[in-house]
Amino acid sequence: MLATPNQLDVGKVADKFLRATTTAKQSGTFNYLLIPNDMKDGTYRYVFAMSFGNASTPYHFGVVSMARLEPDDPRLSRWQRAEAAALRAYKLIIKSVARVAGFPDLRRCVLDFPRSLDELDLKSAEFCPPDRNALVNARILKAEERVAGCAYVAERGYLGDVQKAL
């Protein structure tokens, strides 16, 4: 499954994930595999994540590499590093959900394509209001976000409250 001596081939990983899981093949579901390994695609030196499927396929899934998403700044606490990595992964996954659901290729807010960690960190973690409204109307996103599930979907800073409680 290697593309280079240190990187996995994202296409091979995705193929194995799709073959190994039945939920990835269920219509209307979105499934993401997060891996610790660095990944490569044929045209890029590395990829943070890659999505598969589209509005006309029965499957919607993606693979996210955490290798480059985890901060290595020793000044950050373990919780701060985990929160930064989770937010980076969230931004990639939420963009992917919109794309594989058939949302137009717009380059704004969370839909912007990051070419580096700095760009990923600077981009919004939210859909622009017109995009969010369109996704809610298409029943891709829920109109009301809830606390259950991903902390970043629920509300900004929720993970910090969990951290304080621990």
Image: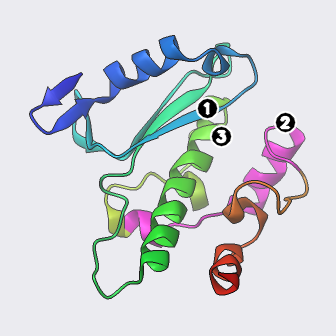
* Observer-nearest of 113 and 161: 161
Residue at the location (79% across, 44% down)? Answer: 135
Which span is picked out in magenta? Answer: 119-142
Q: CA distance from mark 1 to mark 2?
A: 19 Å
Q: Which residue is mark 3?
A: 98
Q: Tell me whether circle 2 and circle 3 mark residues in contact (CB < 8 Å).
A: no
Placement of 124 over or under 24, stated as above or below: below
Residue at the location (71% across, 75% down)? Answer: 158
Q: Tell me whether circle 1 and circle 3 mark residues in contact (CB < 8 Å).
A: no
Q: Mark 3 is on which residue type?
A: Ala
Q: Mark 1 is on which residue type?
A: Asn
Q: Quadrant of residue 157?
A: bottom right
Does any portion of residue 11 appear in the rendered image?
Answer: yes
* Coordinates of residue 145 in the picture (x, y in percent): 85, 59
As drawn, the residue found furthest toward the left would be 5
Q: Mark 2 is on which residue type?
A: Ala
Kind of element beneath mark 1: strand
Q: Choose mark 1 or mark 3, whichever is in front.
A: 1
Q: Which residue is mark 2?
A: 138
Of the numbered discs 2 and 3, the one sitting upstream in the chain is 3
Q: Which residue is mark 1?
A: 31
Does any portion of residue 108 appear in the rendered image?
Answer: no
Q: CA distance from mark 2 to mark 3?
A: 10 Å
Q: Is residue 162 magenta?
A: no
Q: CA distance from mark 1 to mark 3?
A: 13 Å
Q: Tell me whether circle 1 and circle 2 mark residues in contact (CB < 8 Å).
A: no
